[in-house]
Amino acid sequence: MARYLDVAFGMLLGVMGTGAIVAVADAPMVDPVRLSPQYYKVRLDNARVRVLEFRSKPGDKEAMHSHPEGVVFALADATYRNTYPNGPATTRRVAQGDVEWSDAVTHAGENVGSTEGHYYRVELKNCPK
């Protein structure tokens, strides 16, 4: 009887673990514009792209939010700490003029530098894989 309980308990833990992973993977994207309008302005929004302008002062913190894949243009030097739901925080410095590809990401951000951060982010929509 104890063996059956062990097997049943193991199956229950497996199902719960799988459910938790699926729930995280299927979690809805949290729109940074709706969450933090003090930092984001929509500069263009059409069927193919959304262009966001982002500004943050030293010490500003953003709540956890999501971005689809796209391109990021740094318009000012800045240092940011990004925290991810399932990983360690990273701190990195960007220089004015940097242009980078960004995979889809969910993160919280903090301006840990001494300068105002200023970016344009081009978010891609409905792109075939």
Image: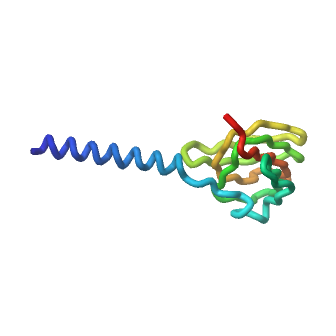
Relative placement, left or right, of 118 versus 83 is right
Q: Can the viewer see residue 101 in this picture? A: yes
| 25 is higher (above) or lower (below) than 54 | above
Q: Which residue shows up at 69% across the image and 49% down it? A: 67
Quadrant position of the N terminus in the picture = top left
Q: Which residue shows up at 66% across the image and 51% down it? A: 66
Relative placement, left or right, of 92 versus 41 is left
Q: Can the viewer see residue 114 in this picture? A: no
Percent across and percent down for residue 87 are: 56, 43
Percent across and percent down for residue 113 are: 79, 50
Relative placement, left or right, of 43 versus 112 is right
Q: Which residue shows up at 39% across the image and 46% down it? A: 17
Q: Nearer the viewer, residue 38 or 122?
A: 122
Name the quadrant containing residue 4: top left
Percent across and percent down for residue 88 are: 58, 43
| 129 is higher (above) or lower (below) than 45 | above
Name the quadrant containing residue 2: top left
Q: Nearer the viewer, residue 112 or 29?
A: 29
Q: Which residue shows up at 86% across the image and 56% down it? A: 43
Colour scheme of the rendered structure: rainbow
Q: Nearer the viewer, residue 100 or 80?
A: 100
Residue most extreme to the left = 1
Quadrant position of the C terminus in the picture = top right
In the rendered picture of this protein, how many numbered marks are placed on residues? 0
Relative placement, left or right, of 112 versus 1 is right
Name the quadrant containing residue 11: top left
Percent across and percent down for residue 90 are: 66, 42
